[in-house]
Amino acid sequence: MSGKIPDLRKLRNIIKESEERIKIADSPIKSAQITPKKENNLSRVDEELNNALGMKTKESNYDKQFLKTIKQEMEELDKELGKHFDNQEEIEDEEDDLCISSESEKEKFISSSPFQLTLQSHYSENSQNIETLKETTPSIKKSENSNSSNEQKNPHSNLKMRLQGALATIKSLEKALKDKEAIIKDLEQEIIKKNKTIESCQSLVNVNSNINRGEGSFKNQLRKKDKEIEQKIKEYEEKIQENKKTMLRMQDLNNHLMAKLKDLDKKKEEKTEKKAKKKKEKNNDKNYFEENEYLKKRLEDLIEKYRNLQVKYDSLAESSAVFEEKTRDLYEANQKLQENLIKIMSSI
């Protein structure tokens, strides 16, 4: 690519191939050449739904590679044009190969450009993209008609404008592809929902067929069940009567037991009262016993004290008797002294 501008015919063929792929992806009816992928392994119900809806399975990378190649080619063209605008002499030598001189070739290039193809393919799905494309295409045509006189003089600027328009269309195609992928996802979800509804309908149909087949046997079974139910009702009524009798017996027993429980409660209360009295008596006995022991100890102490006092009294009595004897002796001696004194005094 160095020193040469890439071939526009090659680029145009790439754009045509990408547009054909986009047309095939946008077509609501299946073509004979396109078949769903084997990796999906759709069931018969899914295939019937796809045939009825006229939808096709999603192809993973149907035109992304082509758009990438177009982008690369366009970017290389811009680079080479920038280089060759500096070298006008080399570009004028190759002017016959690169330019589109006649108006018929211009119209073919515009008609083969992805503007009109996107308008045709996405008219029913993306109205906003259509309006933007419609606004861009007339501006390009007006610029081409106004500059038709200047094409022979400045072919490089015209070619640059066309390449810029092609880049804009590539961007719009990318947006359209994103929108289509979202639509394909929505359609896949709808197909899943419809598959579920078909499965439910098939189950209902199978159930209805089984019901229609077994209507006669079902009536016989109902009669048998009615008889069995009547017998069970009779058995249950008999059981209810027996249960009523047992309930009456149980009520009598319950009343008798309640009376016994009341008597037991009274006896328990009496026993508790007796126990409380006994506890009080025991406590009183303990207190009396303790008091008696204390009094006994006091008596013993007093008896010992009395004995000690008795001993002391005896000793005092003995000493007092001795003292009396001594006092008597002293008294007699005193009287004798007094008599002697009187005699002495009388003698004097």
Image: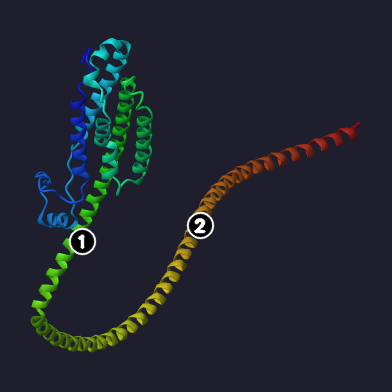
Please report the residue visible at 32 percent of the width from the left and 11 percent of the height from the top: 86
Pointer 1: what residue?
A: 197
Q: Residue 57, image x and y in percent?
A: 16, 47
* Residue 319 position in % (x across, y down): 64, 41
Residue at the image point whose x is 23% and y is 24% from the top = 73
Helix, strand, or loop for circle 1?
A: helix
Q: Which residue is mark 2?
A: 292
The amino acid at mark 1 is Thr
Q: Are marks 1 and 2 in contact (CB under 8 Å)?
A: no
Left or right: 63, with 221 as reference point: right
Residue ID at (56%, 45%) = 308
Asked if residue 125 is positioned above or below residue 106 in the image, the reply reads below
Q: Residue at x 30, y 42 (%)?
A: 119
Viewer-closest of 202 and 276: 202
- Image quadrant where residue 202 sits: bottom left
Given residues 41 and 264, the one toward you in this image is: 41
- Residue 112 vs residue 75, the one in the foreground: 112
Q: Is residue 317 above or below residue 194?
A: above
